[in-house]
Image (cartoon, grey):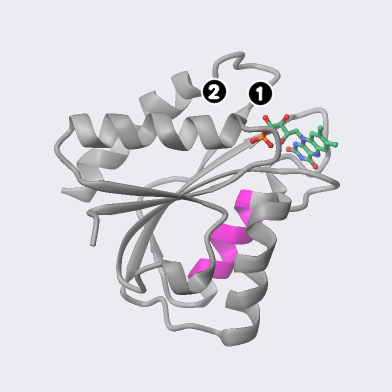
């Protein structure tokens, strides 16, 4: 099992690129990683560290590629008490439902017993042309909390 399993939810690729960038930075810091774009529940280790990176679409909705995972968690109610996770969202503050997807995922995982490491990062793409930049900055502190 990798030290960190990155889980991305993306429609047009931005969140996917951010996840890949963070995986690279984690590898540079000595962690092994596995990056899964829109995985199913059975592909995920039910212990260890997850790093979720998702954009928001529709009106506060999850990207299509993460909806099956959320449905599975909601229906199968897995015990995630051995999971610690980080949460990174991409969204646009032009929407009332800013970063709705990562907020919903964060809440769902906590309800299933998972423990969030550090603060949730919500990247406003209207303020950050390159979302990898604030994500990389956030990662520095997150990595320290992992140790
Ligand atoms: C049709 C559409 C709906 C969106 N809805 C929301 C929203 O409800 N809340 C939000 O914070 N951002 C919203 N966004 C902004 C996206 O989350 C943002 O552009 C993000 O960078 C897209 O990343 P992706 O390419 O990984 O999907 C929306 C964008 C589009 C095109």
Q: Which residues are magenta?
A: 102-110
Q: Is disc 2's CB within 8 Å of ligand 1? A: yes
Q: Which mark is residue 145?
A: none
Q: Is residue 134 left or right of residue 23?
A: right
Using the image, determine if residue 20 lies above or below residue 125: below
Q: Which mark is residue 131?
A: 2
Residue 51, can we see it? yes
Category of crowding for the residue at label 1, using alpha-carbon neighbours closer than 10 angstroms: few (below 14), some (14–19), many (at least 20): some
Residue 109 position in % (x across, y down): 51, 68
Q: Is residue 76 left or right of residue 29?
A: right
Using the image, determine if residue 77 lies above or below residue 96: below
The numbered mark, 1 or 2, whose residue comes first in the sequence reads 1
Q: Residue furthest top?
A: 129
Q: Identify which residue is drawn at 73% across, 30% down.
A: 92
Taking the image in four quarters, ligand 1 sits in the one at top right
Residue 75 position in % (x across, y down): 65, 84
Residue 7 position in % (x across, y down): 47, 51
| Most common SS among magenta residues | helix
Determine whether label 1 and label 2 are within 8 Å by CB: yes
Quadrant where the N terminus is found in the figure: bottom left
112 in magenta = no
Q: Which mark is residue 125?
A: 1
Q: Say which of 39 and 90 sits in front.
A: 39
Residue 118 position in % (x across, y down): 37, 48
Q: Identify which residue is drawn at 21% across, 46% down.
A: 32
Q: Identify which residue is drawn at 25% across, 40% down.
A: 143
Q: Is disc 1's CB within 8 Å of ligand 1? A: yes
Category of crowding for the residue at label 2, using alpha-carbon neighbours closer than 10 angstroms: few (below 14), some (14–19), many (at least 20): many
Q: Identify which residue is drawn at 62% across, 53% down.
A: 103
Residue 140, can we see it? no
Marks 1/2: CA distance? Answer: 7 Å
Q: Which picture quadrant has residue 45?
A: bottom left
């Amino acid at each position: 099992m990798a030290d960190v399993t990155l889980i991305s939810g993306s429609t047009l690729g931005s969140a996917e690129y951010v996840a890949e960038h963070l995986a690279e930075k984690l590898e540079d810091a000595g962690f092994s990683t596995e990056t899964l774009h829109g995985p199913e529940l059975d592909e995920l280790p039910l212990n260890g560290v997850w790093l979720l990176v998702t954009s928001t679409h529709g009106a506060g909705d999850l990207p299509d590629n993460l909806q099956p995972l959320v449905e599975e968690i909601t229906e199968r109610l897995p015990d995630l008490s051995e999971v610690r996770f980080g949460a990174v969202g991409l969204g646009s503050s032009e929407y009332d439902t800013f970063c709705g997807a990562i907020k919903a995922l964060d809440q769902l995982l906590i309800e299933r017993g998972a423990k969030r490491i550090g603060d949730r990062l919500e990247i406003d793409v209207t303020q950050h042309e390159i979302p990898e930049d604030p994500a990389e900055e956030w990662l520095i502190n997150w990595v320290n909390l992992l140790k």
